[in-house]
Image: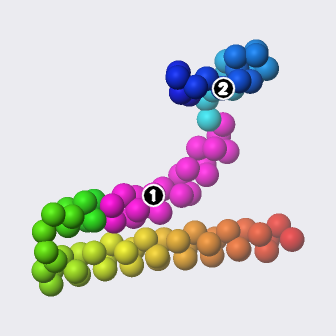
Amino acid sequence: MNPIFPDPARVAGALPPSDREPTDADLQAIEREMPLIEAEIALLDVEIALLDRPLSGVDVKRLRRAERRVLDEILRWLTSRAAAGSEAA
C-alpha cells in the first residue's frame, strides 16, 4: 500500500483491514511463478553488470544463457497454464 496515494476503497472504509494480506491462492500463484521471477532477476543482474563495459565472449555467453533461462521459464509457465486450462475444460 502506497502511503502517498492511498487506496480510495480503504479510505472510504469499503475494505476491511484484514484484506491487506495475500490469500493462500495468491501465495500459491507467486510460488508457481517464482522460477520465472528468479530467472528474470538473474537476467537483470547480468544486464546491469554489463552496462559499463564492452562485451567479451564470456559476457555474451552469460547474457545468452540468462536470456535462454528466461525463455525456458516462460515456455514452462505457458505450457502449465495451457495444461491447466485443458484440464478445466
For disc 1, the marked residue is 37
Mark 2 surroundings within 10 Å by alpha-carbon count, few (fewer than 14), some (14 through 19), many (20 or more): few
- Would residue 34 appear left or right of 21 to someone viewing this image? left
Look at 41% across and 62% down and name the residue there: 40
- Tell me if residue 68 is in the magenta stretch: no
Which range is magenta?
23-44
Element assignment for label 1: helix
Look at 52% across and 23% down and name the residue there: 4
Place of residue 33 in the rendered image (x, y in percent of width and height, measured from the top left): 54, 58
Q: Quadrant of residue 39?
A: bottom left
Nearer the N terminus, badge 2 or badge 1? Answer: 2
Q: Nearer the viewer, residue 79 or 15?
A: 15
- Tell me if residue 35 is in the magenta stretch: yes
Give the amino acid at mark 1: Ile
- Taking the view exactly as shown, the residue that stands out farthest to the right is 89
Give the amino acid at mark 2: Asp
Q: Quadrant of residue 68?
A: bottom left
Q: Quadrant of the C terminus?
A: bottom right
Residue 7 disc label: 2
